[in-house]
Amino acid sequence: MQITGEMLIGATAVRGKDATLHAFDPARGVDLQPAFGGGGAKEVARAADLAELAFDPYRLAPLETRAQFLEAIADNIAELGDTLIERAQGESALPKARLEGERARTIGQLKLFASLVREGRWLAATLDSAQPERKPLPRPDLRLQKIPVGPVAVFGASNFPLAFSVAGGDTAAAFAAGCPVVVKSHQAHLGTSELVGRAIQKAVADSGLPEGVFSLVVGAGNAIGEALVAHPAIKSVGFTGSRRGGLALIEIASKRREPIPVFAEMSSINPFFVLPGALAARAEALANGFVDSVTLGVGQFCTNPGLVLALEGPHLQAFIDYAVSAFEKKGAQTMLTAGIAAAYQEGIARRDQSGVERVATGAESDASCPALPALYTVSAAKFLATPQLEDEIFGPASLIVTCRSEDEMLDLARRIEGQLTATLQMESDDAPLARRLLPILERKAGRILANGFPTGVEVSYAMVHGGPYPATSDSRATSVGAMAIERFLRPVCYQDLPPALLPLALQDDNPLSLWRLRDGELGPN
Ligand code: NAP
């Protein structure tokens, strides 16, 4: 499949005339061909209007059609083969194996949502029978199901050009819910976005769905994204990226004539608690695992462990010594974009000036757009007195905080911001401290791990990739896993509707064979 540099507005390929953009190869430091034409509010309006036109036919089509559509996208992405991987590699400097894994995850997540659509529990079909004889007042017949909210705007992330981008988790969840999607192409991977966009566009046509189910818009700067969030046809937003970007979109969404939700996944430093028993038992293995996790993918993971908490003493010193030695062996590598590399350098420079001690620096290399790994230590007291030490540094950097007592560790845990993950490294004798930490961490993080490393997010039914602000803008939601569909649904109750007008999910004879809550009993009833 050829990359043309066009936007995909419904079934049409449109060359934007407002700007010229190029994808950039950060490893070679060169622009990639072809040039992309950037559009603006006009193309956004066309895409959003088409999405609105497509909404009712799409959501009312049989669930089997929707499931097969998701599977067709997965198949079309697989068919792109090496063309997709090579382009994504050129645009992101991510290794081939990592991108192949990400493609498998993207395909797997589309298929997970296809099976979710078929299974239908997300409809939350609930029937409360009428009680005409009830005194003092009769009860009406009440039936509830969830319906999609409407067209969704998706902003892909730079660090997952496949799994968190055009056909990533937000898009798959929105399609599964029954929402048309307009994606704002990320400037860091324009060609990858077009290839995947065309795979979706083909699946829309082959599935006989209205063209407005999917569009992909491209633009220079923020204006196109702002216009998308502001468009009245858009009813919800999925975003992964910087805190500043997420907050800017939330502000636009909240000032609309009809404010809409923005599900933004923004920043997290993922506290990694190394409890005393674990430190004593396996300081070296823990240090090596931790350093691998911090530097994995040049540290460009939202679940990167950017903060370590442990009790001071000889075992912690041994852990630090092992970590320093492992860090110094890690070389500087190319980041996703020149902008992200510059932001990393600025973050490191700020940290160097904030009075914390840099104890290890990775090995210099001749990589372009480089990030040199950096490890810092600081006392808990100083950490608590320096709020900016909580700011995410997106890249291979981490900060070890030494606590003088369990109470100080608990106090620090209480005071940190919301997180995507919190990790406990522990042995059985650490259970009393872990038991004291858990209720605190439940209030802080979307996922709590024991004896693992937070980088690497499974796509499954029980996964939560979310958490209180600033990890996300809405701690009730996840952007990974089956529950992500909930962000794009809303409940509707039907009171005393004549049987012939009831939606299939709520009809007496249960034609969709759903599990339903009927008069308080859950079952295939
Ligand atoms: P970003 O700058 O927030 O951009 C993400 C997307 O949102 C892009 O498509 C961008 O469009 C758009 N956007 C950003 N600000 C906007 C605004 N004010 N109005 C309209 N659209 C806006 O994130 P990024 O490019 O992926 O990475 C930059 C930084 O984000 C990193 O250095 C890192 O700090 C953070 N990050 C965090 C995570 C995480 O998971 N926590 C993941 C990736 C990145 P344009 O490209 O056209 O500006």
Image (spheres, rainbow, N blue to C red):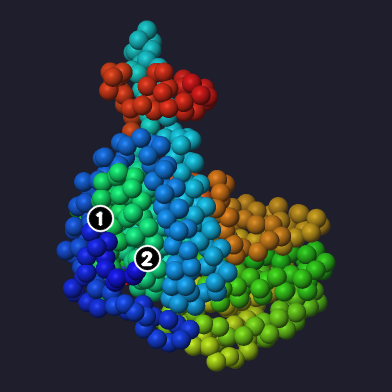
Vertical position of residue 55 compared to residue 132: above or below: below
Does residue 109 appear in the picture of this structure?
Answer: yes
Residue tagged 2: 1
Foreground of the two, 512 or 69: 69
Assign a secondary structure to mark 1.
Answer: loop
| Label 2 environment density (alpha carbons within 10 Å; few <14, some 14–19, many ≥20) | few
Residue lying at 46% horizontally and 50% vertically, measured from the top left: 110
Residue closer to the observer: 81 or 348: 81
Answer left or right for 175 relative to 233: right
Q: 295 and 81: which one is in front? A: 81
What amino acid is labelled 2 in the image?
Met
Quarter where residue 190 is shown: bottom left
Which quadrant contains ligand 1? bottom left
Of residues 245 and 403, the one nearer the viewer is 245
State the SS at label 2.
loop
In the image: residue 366, left or right of residue 161: right
Q: Residue furthest top?
A: 133
Q: Residue at x 56, y 77 (%)?
A: 298
Residue to which mark 1 is pinned = 11
Q: Is mark 2 within 8 Å of ligand 1?
A: no
- The amino acid pointed to by label 1 is Ala
Of mark 1 and mark 2, the one earlier in the sequence is 2
Q: Position of residue 444 (x, y in %)?
A: 55, 57
Residue at image coords 48%, 35%: 119
